[in-house]
Amino acid sequence: MEHFSEEDLGRLLSKLQLEEKVLLLTGRDSWSLHPLPSIGLRSIVVSDGPAGVRGDVWDERSPSANFPSPTALAATWDRAAVRTIGWGLGSEARRKSVDVVLAPTVNLHRSPYGGRHFEAFSEDPVLTAELAGEYVRGIQEYGVGATLKHYVANESETERFTVDVRVDERTLRELYLLAFESPVTEAGSWLVMSSYNSINGVTASENELLTRPLNDEWGFDGVVISDWTAVRSLESAHQAQDLAMPGPTSAWSESLLEAVRTGDVSEAAIDRKVLRILRLAARVGALGGPSPDVPAPVDVRMIARTVSISGSVLLSNDGILPLPPAPSIALIGEGARVARSQGGGSATVIPEAVVSPADGLRRRFGEDAIAWAPGAVVDRRPSPLPLTEVADLSGAPGVSVRYLDTEGVELGRETRRATTIVSFEGSSMLTRAATVEMSFRYTPRRPGSTPLAVIGLCDFEVHIDGSAATAGSIRLRPGDDFATSVLTPPFTAIELPVAAGGSDVVVRFTPVPGGVPDAVALGVGSPAPALDGDALIAEASALAASREVAVVVVSTSAEVESEGFDRQTLSLPGRQDDLVRAVVAANPRTIVVVNTGAPVVLPWRDDVAAILAVWFPGQEFGDALAAILSGDAEPGGRLPTTWPSAENEVPVSAVTPVEGRLDYAEGIHVGHRAWLAAGRAPAYPFGHGLGYTTWAVDSIEAPAALEPYAGVRVAATIRNTGARCGKVVVQFYLERVSASGVDRPVRWLAQFETAHLAAGEVRAVETTISGRRFAHWADGWTVEPGAYRVVAALDVADPGKHADLVIG
């Protein structure tokens, strides 16, 4: 940007014809903007995040680093750690020639039933805003734009394209807008994404909230990009909506050009939008001139591993952890071998490799130390056919793919090292083809009648060894989200008579409409096996009884936590609860590793020796887990969201609209605030986490009086009472002491600091609490005079130590 002044950008704008200006306001395709060579503007490339940078090719040919999910990042409570993730994403974006990362997601965990919460940070606006700001700074230091999304009040997925969220202005300001504010005003995010939902009757892309507070109050000077297809009409052109995605057509396109010509939309409004796109282009180096100075690439594997450890939360521990040097371990769980490193939906990336818990533990403790049993079936979706079982026409691992037009003329062919192929580009061979033919030599481990999953919205024919085997159709079911038809495509299972030495298989797909326009996913895979649940549990129990320690990995699946739908239950899928109970009955020295993106209920939590929440920990899952279990590293996380003890105790559970409306009736009492207001004790409170040492808050110092709107410097004296060095997260909460006519939370987070102390060390941890943290919204930020309490605590339920102060 330093190479282009505002005057420079204005001169470039003045060179453009109206048609060129309007062209810039709709994407060129799904993932890029139009170039204008006449002014030196190249195409700007955008890519999904937030746990990795997908790039314009989303398949095995261009793998991506897979970082821990945002809930894992938030669980670090560590600004510096999240900044390194930003560096990793910025570095990856540069490697993949991506200019804009469509992340971070800063919506709140309003209810644990939100299906996409793994992609957002936390239930608290202060924690979310602080960490999102570091994420933005890290990305943008690489000359890559970060995108705050989804603006605003987009905390659930049910009816996500049409839901009208009803929320009062105070709640909107104090919670949902607050999460966006400092990442704009302090971190300076270059983009904000308008969401699908309506807010108080007006869809986000047409909402006044894009102007006030985003532009008028916060001084946002970047681009408001729409969520994909979230621009619904020309009305959004009158608002501060700058860019409609995807292209090449949108609700604007030619109609916007005509509206300007007739005077319905002013050219000044168009110029304002175009200038912002040019400003973005200058920032990312898309306007010619020298490339932005950016830091050197970073070690993404090291960052992923370190942050996974820092965000893992030790929920309970009877002393079993860390493990002794040479334990014999019964490793149990489907997820121990097929790691769940990330959530489903647009956040998904394809890493080059994922270190499973089995891989990591064997590497750390030795091959003979680990014995594995599956225990229970979790994921019912097909898995890819192993490359050891499929060969292309040349005999190399993979499949041969031909693309044919409506006349049967070949558009092209290629060899792929994956058995499901995906494209979001209308210009690709996959999306242009009328027929896609996938051929391979199939040699499964067990020949004979072999199950095969056919995947994708299509009509299909399957031929084996030159003869027609079967045909069928795959369609979306009632209630399926069309937008996830590419990310989690529908499938059907068939039986193939495979010969003893292998068979030649040809699958011909005819794609059908019904999913995302210009996007296709087709392929084959192995259906989830139908196994005897009792036998699996009995096998796991016997293995646990034969070993010194049992480590059970329990997890959700893409059918439970994903973009496109909300959760129906907080219970673990399948018979995993039965599995844990059986294993701990066989061996009380049982450690449970909870591999989920958001809270689940753990009905056996008081019976097991230790529980470790690792979230969706990214591609280095297994090595990070091994470091924690062995004691080579400490699990440094604290909960960024409350974990309930039972579903009927969750204070905010409504995520399903009623007649199209979703009322945020709980107001400001969300997350830990709602639990405190209801007087209920969850299984694990907000901010909870144990680590491998113990802590005490000895005292807190704060001034006795404070002027309204002034910040306050406080210091908490913290003591490491344990036998080893560890990480402490000091949480500073506020409470209202004197009587008040304003509805306030029982206690609310005002600030936090992270420190590492040696065994026995005592340190004063200092911080500044902004004057805004004392304020409430009443047609403006208002600080009510009276007595307040500042509490330094180790979680929201910890009495901690407090100091009272009076605001005059």
Image: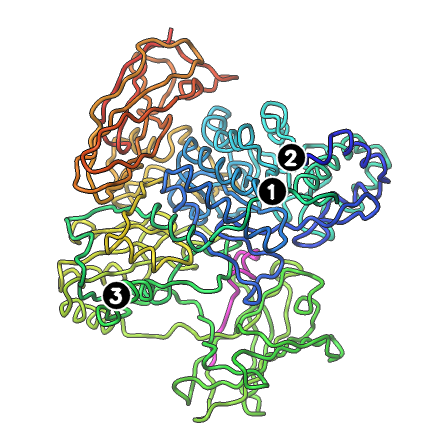
Disc 2: which residue = 222
Q: Residue 441 at what x, y percent from top left? A: 53, 86
Please report the residue visible at 20 percent of the width from the left and 50 percent of the height from the top.
605
Give the CA distance from mark 1 to mark 2.
10 Å
Viewed as shown, does residue 464 lie left or right of 544? right
Viewed as shown, does residue 324 lie left or right of 205? left
Q: Quadrant of residue 403?
A: bottom right
Indicate the secondary structure of the residue bearing disc 2.
loop
User: Hey, what amino acid is under mark 3?
Assistant: Ile
Q: Is residue 350 above or below residue 569?
A: below
Q: Quadrant of the C terminus?
A: top left
Q: Residue 407 at what x, y percent from top left? A: 76, 78
Q: Are marks 1 and 2 in contact (CB under 8 Å)?
A: yes
Disc 1: which residue = 145
Q: Give whichever of 419, 605 is nearer the camera.
A: 419
Q: Residue 547 at what x, y percent from top left? A: 15, 67
Disc 3: which residue = 332
Please report the residue visible at 53 percent of the width from the left and 74 percent of the height from the top.
419
Q: Give whichever of 261, 337 is nearer the camera.
A: 337
Q: Residue 303 at what x, y percent from top left? A: 43, 50
